[in-house]
Structure formats: structure tokens, C-alpha cells
Amino acid sequence: MVAEPPAQPAPAARRPGAGTPRRSRRGRLPGRQDWSTWPHYQAAERGFRGYWYPVAFSSKITGRPTAVTLLGERIMVMRDRGTVYALKDRCPHRGVPLSHGDQQFPGTVSCVYHGWTFDLRSGDLVAAITDGPSSPICGKVTQPTFETAERLGMVWIFVGDGEDAHPIDEQLPEELVDNPAVVGVRLQRRAGDWRFAVENGYDEGHAKYLHRTSLWRLFKPMPVHNDTRIVKRGRWIYRVQDRQYWEADFPGLGKWSGQAWYKLRPPKENAGNSNIGNTGGSQKVDETIAAQDFPGFASVSMPGVLRIAYPRFIHYEFYVPVDAGEHLYVGVMAGFRRGIRTLPFYAKYLGAVRWLFHGQFSGQDKWMVEVTDAPPERLYRPDDSLLQWRRLAEDVTKARTGQLRAEGLTGEDPEPEAVP
Amino acid sequence: MVAEPPAQPAPAARRPGAGTPRRSRRGRLPGRQDWSTWPHYQAAERGFRGYWYPVAFSSKITGRPTAVTLLGERIMVMRDRGTVYALKDRCPHRGVPLSHGDQQFPGTVSCVYHGWTFDLRSGDLVAAITDGPSSPICGKVTQPTFETAERLGMVWIFVGDGEDAHPIDEQLPEELVDNPAVVGVRLQRRAGDWRFAVENGYDEGHAKYLHRTSLWRLFKPMPVHNDTRIVKRGRWIYRVQDRQYWEADFPGLGKWSGQAWYKLRPPKENAGNSNIGNTGGSQKVDETIAAQDFPGFASVSMPGVLRIAYPRFIHYEFYVPVDAGEHLYVGVMAGFRRGIRTLPFYAKYLGAVRWLFHGQFSGQDKWMVEVTDAPPERLYRPDDSLLQWRRLAEDVTKARTGQLRAEGLTGEDPEPEAVP
Amino acid sequence: MVAEPPAQPAPAARRPGAGTPRRSRRGRLPGRQDWSTWPHYQAAERGFRGYWYPVAFSSKITGRPTAVTLLGERIMVMRDRGTVYALKDRCPHRGVPLSHGDQQFPGTVSCVYHGWTFDLRSGDLVAAITDGPSSPICGKVTQPTFETAERLGMVWIFVGDGEDAHPIDEQLPEELVDNPAVVGVRLQRRAGDWRFAVENGYDEGHAKYLHRTSLWRLFKPMPVHNDTRIVKRGRWIYRVQDRQYWEADFPGLGKWSGQAWYKLRPPKENAGNSNIGNTGGSQKVDETIAAQDFPGFASVSMPGVLRIAYPRFIHYEFYVPVDAGEHLYVGVMAGFRRGIRTLPFYAKYLGAVRWLFHGQFSGQDKWMVEVTDAPPERLYRPDDSLLQWRRLAEDVTKARTGQLRAEGLTGEDPEPEAVP
């Protein structure tokens, strides 16, 4: 009641589409009441199964088990003689996390409680130490395992529905597979629905307003509004800026502009590369980046990967569902160069991008993702970007689910559950 | 199990009348099982709609938005060119609190996320900055607004069901409207159901026992028990003390008294002003207070206002429902004087009342309101004061609800919900 | 998602047998899905009624009321002229804890709010101070009381279903009733279901693996596995170790042993007292302990009492249900001696047992009890000890419940509720 810090909605209230909206005369909020237009998307509060997700820096995964949570599943990850293994993090005996245990024999992990010992590769129970070598339970229990990979300095895990994992390179942004790249990465666990994070990342409208005060944009003007189209190419949808408006006169209110005397001047007209970077700058474009011939500077693909192309580097954001209402933010800055030419990249990353872009600028997004509370929601014209993303997620998932059902790999229930 | 700090009931358990009481042979508690005798009162865990409530000091409400919660509703409050405005604190676009935003144009507030801009007076969406001046959404969205007022150095907000607000002066204690007054105010957000706070405030029984150890009563004796009647006059019900008993002899137990050698002597017989103040003192009564001719020194009115008349000042408590299980305590000391004569008032307020009465004494009430856990409850004779208050709240609300229904302003549901 | 501290299951998830297990093709976990084989045991998340439980050190219970929670009931405990009394810790008037109050008259306790005064022995309301000596409510209200006792330096409370308490000495371990004993006691409130604590305590399998790293076992080897039988005698079931295996060779994995160069050598063959202590040591056995002729060194009885017999002392653990998911650990070291001979006992207790055994060793058990998450569970051969304990608890409770029903003292509902 009395003056208080701005309230955050309670976690329960943040789950999109959960429960039936209230429709009383007094209580009904304007706009869209739920996400039932996209039923798979609405149900995906813990993420979409059937994809690879980054979970930790490779350097943090050692011979000592580590616990991670991914799409609501608790997973133990550890390294054995160079290879990373991932097992369900719950000993089937009495439910104690395997991540509390350690390694007693090469190629295995043992539960701390009674020494149940699992083969890291197959998940087979190969010994129950405290029942001796002739324990009849050996060979009768198999712990669920997950496929793993290492890319971009991180460990990735595939969470599916029993099907074989597709090659991770089919899922990574193509330019990162086909070219040598140098990367700077930031991992941060964040509150808020992972879908709010994707929608915020790809949202056409907010950057020009929310981020106008960020240090990253201190000297660079931001447009007030844009003419935008969304185009699809392959697995990606792209935002194409047909025109940028650097100031505007709002009837009855006055002029408004993202410019300031200390900021660079915006370009007189749209440069040829206006879709590389969003400042309208005319920097020379890196040839690998130019070769991609991106239709627009911002693009998104499943299961929640954002790509922002700048003239000299590409910025990616991977939004990894941890559990309902929590996600892992993975910010990646990638440059396409080798050897001595990586030095200026590191200088730029460590001297600026890490703190200003992946840090304070992205911190504003973190704030919004925490306080977004939708549906209900009342969308406006620039939200076409959101709608196209939801449509993409829905269509791809519908196709995948249909295929799994044809293969007998999934039941009726569209809700993710534990791996068998 | 082992020795532990005295337990407080869990928040959920503190909601009166919530859920069906358990009636098994073993579990049934004695006395009244619920508050269904007063159905509107039982349903009012978030307070009664249709009233003005103080929410903050006027000095704290500036051009920078502030979030308050009142009767379970999140409200943004801000000042624009001297006037205070209040809007529902949830941008209809994506649910972000408007209180995170700021002002971009005079007479408006803008959401921090995408610059949706609302007229403070009407709630109309007058611009969506990031969609430019021709955004088709303008004029199609109106944010709910609340009427505001400023009195006694505080901002007040009217929460109703769609009807026009009555003038706030019809609701304030009459003597504060008709006379110049000087006030000292304390605001404190407190745990506990707002109804426990009203009931505690008007409760005839507890003061003499609970507060006998307070510093405010250090030198003043308290009666052991009283003969009391409740009388109604206008909007108020009054406690009339017909007789005070300064000591008592409990059969089989012994004598008990609120007196002590270091306390003042209680009066030999009830003085003519025994209903002004509750110590039986014989101080000369301020003429404005005397002119009110209060039938009793303690009175209460809707929607939860306590008035304790002392010879030289009146003490008020406003119990403002924040949300289920939380309220705002507003303690007001008022003197009816002007100019140089306010100086001794301030000296008494700042030197004693604020710390001893609104502070430590009221802190004992805060403690009881936190740990009260009713129903079930087993009432006793002095609880007639509680019962009369509940009856007042029920009757007034029944009449108001009937009138709103006749005007088509409310539906079947007696539960408060969001303003349309 | 990213590296995180090993997860603990959420409290709700720790309640054994609560709710229906999920049986989807993907989600079904291996093994036993619930505890419906033992319905009374499955329902006993707040403990078994009809027993004495230790709640606090005697020295901590004084004339000032103390709040304890036992089997989900909040109880006020206080001492009056040497005797300990226990009353339901909720004043029937308005639900305020009596433990917030104090004593106004000998033999009574008064509620802090309005001075309702209860006889400590009978629970009768003998005065309502603020309603004077003639208050009509006196004699109409009786507060539930609990029988109390003092043993082993602790206060014990009987929680039943309305029946008279059996003598506490019928429930204590027989040797503690029949012989002079000196004790060292540790009380610690712990998270986790009390049943996990009993099961952990009597569990045949874990000690040899989990505790092999404890300081208490620093110089003593632990077997790898045992041949074990469970035998019943009187109220107790005993673990009989027929054979201990000090090392083992696991096919395809290698040798594993609880021995180390700095540990004592294990005995060549099982000594005659191999069932006293579990290290295979050959210390001379105390004559009182020898006289018990225990069939095995580890035994358990209702309502959750563990007894581990060592050559020179006996160690007991009482697992006292506080509420769902919380228990009180009571570790007792007892020696059967008097006078000057108690000095070496105290030296051993204070110098070693308290820190190494009741402390760090037992802390490993505490850790496991916190993270156990069953059912579902997949038991193995050494879990026969668990199964026999559950069978004992089920059989004894079935007999007791049948008897109470015959006496008309309990209804259909097997769930514990408040005492009438």
C-alpha cells in the first residue's frame, strides 16, 4: 500500500496461458486472453524437446559430477577421460542425486549413498558395491542417459522423446559450422519464462525505446519507429527494416527522437547495409558475414536462437529453458577470423561487448523478461515479429510431433515428461 | 519439536473463513467455526470496495511513478503539475508495470518497455512511441484509472465497482472536515488480515491486559475490567464505559490489578469525562473535542476507521487492506488548533506519541494481529464490541451492494476483482 | 541449467507416497511406485500417534512457556513448581499461541492477549481476567492437554487419540529402565521425512559406503558387504550379521575395499561378539550390555527408535516427527555405570562421540535424509532391513488401530488430526 519498490508479478502468475482466464464483467482484461492459437507453444513452459541446448562452459565439466536442470529435468554431467556424459540425476534406488556421488571405477559414476555404480555410456547398473560382486540387481537397472556434444566452448545436451539425436551441426547457425570462428560467451541463469526471453529478443518494438538509455547505445542514435517485414528463409525468420524513422511528431503531444547532441548523426538515407546492425551505420562488412546475404539483421530459429548481424561480428542469444519460469541466457559474440586477427576481436569483446552489450544492455532485457506478465496481452503492429516467431515454433513442433507419433515414439500428451 | 521461537500461523492459515472447517470427532475446535453469519464480511479478506483509502504520504508522490497495492490491486500513482493520478499498474500490452516507466510528455506516463503512453486523466492510450505517430492502436485502448484526493498530508484513492466516488469529506471523521487540525501521522505496512487489525483496535478486552506493560501506560493504571455498552450514532458505533473496575479477586486464584506503586492512582469514582481517554483522568477537555459530545471514547466506522478521543487530542487508526493477509496501519494524532498553539502539539507528538503510542504500544497490537488465527474462535462477553463492528460492516455492505445491483453496476459475485 | 549446487528435491516432492504416481510411457520410473503395501505407514507422514516422544532438554523447560511442534501439533510446554505441563498451543478465544503468554497465578498459564487463564493440569479455563471474576465463560472451556514425563534428561510428551497414555517405561528400551545409566544427548531439528530418518538409521547397506569417509571410522575398516538376517524378538527387530566381507572384486571393474594402510586390520574371522559393534573388534563387552544378549548389534522398534550396541556403550537414535518433512534427531549415548566410573564415559562422550559420531558421522545421515526422494524406489537385497521395519510399523499400527476402533476411540480416518 504505502510507497513500495515496483512490484514483480508472483512466479505463478508469470506462466503464460496457465489456467483459465477470468472473464467476469469487472475482471476481464483487454486483448488476447490466452495462447491457444498456438497450442504447442502454449504448453511449452518448460521448453521444446527434440533439440540440443548449451548448459555449461566445457571448462566447468570435470571428473566431479555437476548437476544441471534442463527443460525441467535434473541431469548429472561429468567428464571421463575427455568425454562428457549426462545421466538422469536421480539414483533409482532411493532418489538421491547422482551428482552428490563420485567415481569409484573408470567409466562409471557411483551414488554416494549405497555405492550403486552406473556405466556412464550405457547407464547400466554395473555394480551395487554394498551388495557385493554377486548382487542380483546388476544388469536389471538402466539409468536414462542423454547425448552430449561440445561446441563454442560449451557442453550441449540433447533432450528428446526417445528418438535419436540429430547431429548438433544441423541445429547450430550455419555460419558457425562452416567457418572458423572466435567467440566470447556469457552464461547467466535468469528468472522469467524462456518464451518471454525469445519474444523480447526478437521483438521489433522495444530496442529503440527501452535500450535508448543503455551505455552500449550511448553515442549511437536509435530510430523512433521502423517499417518492418518478416521474411522466412530456411529454418530462420528475418526482420527486414524497409525504412527507419529517426524522429516523430506525435499529435497533441510533441516531437520525440532517439537522437541527442552527443550521439552520432543518423544516416541521411538508408544505406545498402542498413540491415546489418541496426544503427544505420556504414561500416565495411566482414566478408564471411556478407557472404551469408542475410535478408535482415535480426533473425530467430528454433528452439529459441536469436542472431543479430553486425558489420564486423554476429551476436547470438540462446534462451535455454531450465524449468517453468527460469531460463539460461547464453550470449555469444562471434567473429570469423583466425590467428593474429583474433586479437582485436578479444580486445573488443573483453573491453566492451562483454560489459556493455552482454552486460548492461542485456540486463535491461533481463529486467523486462522478469516483469512481463502475459497473456492477457494487447498486441500492436510491431508485434508481428512475435507472432511470426510463435507461428514458426508452432508449425515446426506440429510437424515434429506428427512424425514422432507416426514412429510410435510419443503418446497423446503434448506435455514434456521424464525421459523413460 | 525441540524448543523453538513461538510459532506464527502460516499466511494461508490466517485467512478468516477460508475453506471449510474440519469437523471430525478429533479435530473440531470449540466455538464459532466460521464467519458465515456475516457473509460480506467473511468474503472481504481484501477489504471493502466503494471507499477512499490513504496509501502514502503526499510528499512521497512525485513525478516519478510509485507502485502501491490496495485491496489486492496494483496501482501506479504519480503527480503531474500538482495533481495526483492513479492508473492500474499493468500495461495492457505485455503486462509490464507502468510504475517502471516515466513521463515523456506532460500529462502522460509511458511504459518503459515499448513507450506506450497513457493520458493520466482519462487513461487513454495517446501514443505508442515505437509504432510512430500513425499507430492504429491509439484511441483503442484505455487504462483503468482511480479517483484520488489529498487529505491529512496523505494521498487517498477510491476503489469502487464502477460507480462514481462519493466526496471524500463524507467519509472522513466529521470533526476533521469541519475544523482546522494539526496532525502527526505514522504509516506502517503490516502482516495480518486487515479485519484482525480493526477488531483488535476496537476490541474492548485486550487493552487493559496486553498493553498494561507498554511504556505509554507506564505511569497510568489500567482497569481490570469494565461494564461496557455499544451505542450507534450516525456512521459510528461507540463504546460507552459505564463502570471501570481497578482491581479484582479471582476465586481460587487471587487478586489481580493493573495498578502499581509507581503508577498514578485511579479516580475514586467515574469522573464526568470518563469516556474521554480511558485512564479515568480528569484533564480539561479541548473545546472542539468536547463539542463533538462523543457518547464514548472509542468509536469505529466503515471501512475500518478507529477513533479514540483523549482530552487534548484525538487518535485515529485507519486499517487499509493491501492484499489478503497484509494491511497498512495509518496512525493519526490530531489536535484542533492553529498557529503558535500547534507547537506544544508537535512537541508532544514528536517527543512522545510517535514513539510510545504509534510505536511501542501499537507494536503490541501489530504482534497480536500477526498471530491471531480465527475462526474458529470462542468469543466472550467483552467481544460484544467485535460483534457490533461486524454487524455494522455487514449491514452497510448489504445496503451498498443492493444499491449497486439495482444500478446494474455489480454482478452476482461478492468477491472483489479487477476494475473493468 | 548452468553448473549449480547439487539440487535438493522440493519439500512437496519429499513426501513418500503422496499423490498418484505418473504412469505415462515416458515418465514411469522403475521399481516400486508407492507404499500402498503398508497403508498405515504410507499415511504416517506426520508420525504415529499413541506414543511418547522426547521434545526438549528438561533444563530448557522452565516457568516461561515454550512452543514445540510434535506430529504436526503445536504444543505449549512449561514447568510449574517442578512439574512439566503441556497444552495445545492455541488459545481457543482468538487463536493466539499460549506460548506467547506467561503465568499470572500459580498452576496456570495466561494468554498474552486478553488474559484467558487455564489450569495447567486440567486445561480448564479458570479466569478470563479482562472480564472480571464473574465472567460467565469460566468453566465452559477446556484446553486440550498432553501427558508428560521426564527421562534421560529430556521432556517427553504422549500424543494419542484420546486413550490414556501407557507408562513411558513400557516404551523405552528395556535396559534403560532396568539399569542405572549415564547418558550424553544431542538434539537437532532436521529437514526430511522422519521415515527416511528411521530407514536410513536401520538401513543395512549405506553405513559401509557412505560413512567410510567419516572421522568416526578414520582408523577402523568397514566391510564391503555382509550376509545379514533380520530376526524379531519382543518389540524389536534385529540385524544379525552372519558374515562380513572386507574386500570384493567386481567383475570388469576391479577390487574395492573399505580398508586402508592407516586403518586397523579387520578380524581374521568373525569373533564371537561380531554382532556387538560393527567393526569386528574384540573389545571386552560391558556386563549389562552382554546381559541383554542381543541377537544383533542393530535393532529398531516403534515408533522409530534405533539401538546400536557397542562393547562399552549403547547408541540410540530417536526420530521424532515434527511435521510433514521435518523431524527431530535425538542421539543418545548410554553407559551402564555409576559414580566415579561415569568419568571416563563423559570423557569419551564429550571428547569424541558428541563431535565425531553424533556430529560429523550423523551429519552424513542428515544429508542423505534431506535428499532421499522415494517412492518411486528400486530396492535391493540389503534393503530387507527397511522392508522388515515397514512391516513391523504396519503390523503394530494395524493392531493398535483395531483396538482403538473396538473401544470407540477413533473413526474411519487413518490421518492424524488435532486432539479433541
Image (cartoon, coloured by chain):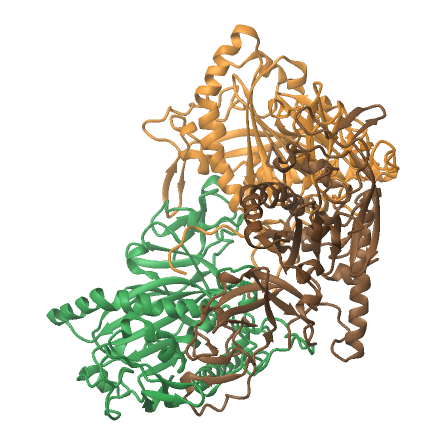
Chain colours: A brown, B orange, C green
The part of the image, by quadrant, that contains residue B162 is top right
From where the camera sits, is residue B48 visible? yes
- The residue lying toward the viewer, choosing from C184 and A78, is A78
Name the residue furthest left: C340
From where the camera sits, is residue C161 visible? no
- The residue lying toward the viewer, choosing from C257 and C303, is C257
**A235 sits left or right of C132 in the view:** right
Coordinates of residue B295 in the picture (x, y in percent): 61, 24
Name the residue furthest front: A340
Coordinates of residue C383 in the picture (x, y in percent): 45, 84
**A70 sits left or right of A32 in the view:** left
Looking at the image, is B6 positioned above or below residue B398? below
Coordinates of residue C382 in the picture (x, y in percent): 43, 86
Looking at the image, is C169 positioned above or below residue A344? below
- The residue lying toward the viewer, choosing from A311 and B11, is A311
Q: Check the picture and name the quadrant holding the N terminus of chain B.
A: bottom left
Q: Check the picture and name the quadrant holding the C terminus of chain B.
A: top right
Q: Residue at x 28, y 57 (%)?
A: C59
Coordinates of residue B28 in the picture (x, y in percent): 58, 61
- The residue lying toward the viewer, choosing from A212 and B197, is A212
Looking at the image, is A252 positioned above or below residue C27? above
